Image: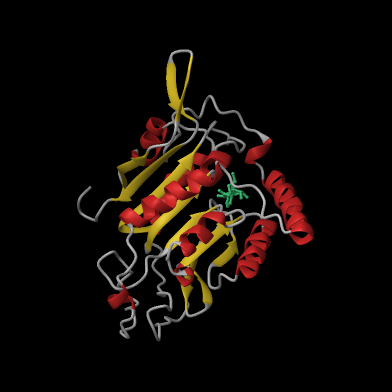
Amino acid sequence: MAAPPSDAELQPSKLGTKEHWDHVYSSELANFNEIGDEGEIWFGEESVEKMVDWALEHVPLPSVSSSSSSVPPSPSSPSSPSSPSHPSILEVGSGNGTLLFALAEAGYAPHHMCGIDYSADAVALAESIAETREIEGILFAQRDFLGEEVPVLGGGETHEVGGESPAVGGEETSTPLFTTNPSTWDLVLDKGTYDAIALGEKDEWGLSPAARYPARVARLLRPGGYFLITSCNFTEEELKASFTAEKTLRYHSRVQHRTFSFGGQSGSVVCTVAFVKVEEGSV
Ligand SMILES: C[S@@+](CC[C@H](N)C(=O)[O-])C[C@H]1O[C@@H](n2cnc3c(N)ncnc32)[C@H](O)[C@@H]1O
């Protein structure tokens, strides 16, 4: 288990509790129902645009000719940049769903996207916004990323990873791939969730819940799949140290954010870093 390097400095706060987020999303949901306000965009529109641009560059959309193929995806071969299938995208702690909606608007297939959040009202809010914006097909599910399995997508049904569910093949390429193998996601995203998790109560050994996070992400990615994270609580170097410690993820690239200067030091308020899951046998 990888301890975040600055773990000792980050003291638990209410931002690391489910009660806090339940409260936030209960009021955001009420606002949305009353006045149509979609709620907070964590780290601003620019961070959303930067994450979408990174995805478009590194996790390409299938070409028009291949996506119109009538050949259904094979349940044993997860979608990959070289396959005609749309990339599968999971957001951990999807909140109001802004990032996934932006990816859908950029051309990624909603049926291949899933957002999980442990707050039921966050899930309800994201679903309501999707309905209002007429974006159909993204699966939003209530899950605690650290303690529960992530759903797998298939034929309009939700299955538990590792469960005894029947395999569901697609009739057309817009139907998501079904597999019981958890290591299938092409892209896992995090915007502010690892930050929140790192502020949770430490265990009896003084470890933050964030220590369990890197292994869980690595398990969900297919070999060669990407993890893209935007954080405000950790520096790029700290993220690199935490996510590469177990050697299942390797640093891939970073996204440049606007910098500010203060007292002779220059830095960014947030950082976005990408990691890639190492191919089996190459560790
Ligand atoms: C700072 S907000 C960011 C929300 C969203 N990613 C965005 O950018 O708008 C952190 C989110 O993580 C969720 N969260 C925190 N811990 C979680 C956990 N263990 N499992 C699932 N979701 C969690 C919270 O409910 C909240 O929606």
Q: Position of residue 225 (x, y in %)?
A: 33, 56
> Residue 98's x, y, as percent?
56, 55
Q: Nearer the viewer, residue 145 or 54?
A: 54
Q: Residue at x 48, y 13 (%)?
A: 263
Visible in this render: residue 246? no
The N terminus sits in image quarter:
top left
Horizontal and vertical percent for residue 12?
A: 62, 32
x 43%, y 79%: residue: 175
Q: Is residue 166 above or below residue 14?
A: below
Q: Nearer the viewer, residue 190 or 166?
A: 190
Snapshot quadrant of residue 34: bottom right
Q: Considering only vertical position in the picture, is 216 above or below 43?
A: below
Note whether residue 30 is visible: yes
Q: Residue furthest left?
A: 282
Q: Quadrant of residue 271?
A: top left
Which residue is painted at 42% across and 78% down in the image? 174
Residue 108: image location, x then y, percent = 42, 65
The structure residue drawn at horizontal position 38% and vertical position 37%, both measured from the top left corner, is: 256
The answer to which quarter of the image holds residue 281 is: bottom left
Give the image's coloring scheme.
secondary structure
Number of numbered discs:
0
